[in-house]
Image: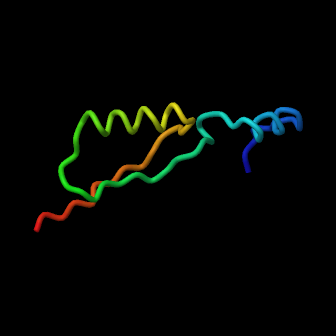
Amino acid sequence: MSKNTINRDELKKNFKNPPNEYGELPCYWWESGKLDKDIVRDQITDMRNKGMSGTVMFNLYFPG
């Protein structure tokens, strides 16, 4: 068990507005081949502007 404690008011505040380390973390993947650096940058910036604290990225391209 953690020795860190938090009082009720702080818990309520953090529950309503979580710090970044407890924010949403979407999985993000591409299925269409080569990545475009500018598009990826714009999409990541858009996620950040919408409050996402990070992402897990996958490229699912299988050359065939």
In the rendered view of the protein, which quadrant contains the C terminus?
bottom left
**Residue 17 % position (x, y):** 72, 35
Query: Which residue is nearer to you in this view: 31 or 26?
Result: 31
Q: As drawn, which residue projects farthest toward the right?
A: 8
**Residue 61 % position (x, y):** 22, 60
Q: Residue at x 33, y 34 (%)?
A: 41
**Residue 3 % position (x, y):** 76, 41
Horizontal arrangement in the rendering, residue 6 relative to residue 54 (left or right): right
Q: As drawn, which residue projects farthest toward the left?
A: 64
Query: Which residue is nearer to you in this view: 1 or 37?
Result: 37
Q: Is residue 47 above or below residue 34?
A: above
The part of the image, by quadrant, that contains residue 42 is top left
Q: Residue at x 24, y 57 (%)?
A: 32
Q: Residue at x 45, y 35 (%)?
A: 46
Q: How many marks?
A: 0
Q: Is residue 58 above or below residue 44?
A: below
Query: Which residue is nearer to you in this view: 12 or 33?
Result: 33
Q: Residue at x 69, y 37 (%)?
A: 18
Horizontal arrangement in the rendering, residue 60 relative to residue 16 (left or right): left
Query: Which residue is nearer to you in this view: 24 or 39?
Result: 39
Q: How has the structure been colored for display?
A: rainbow
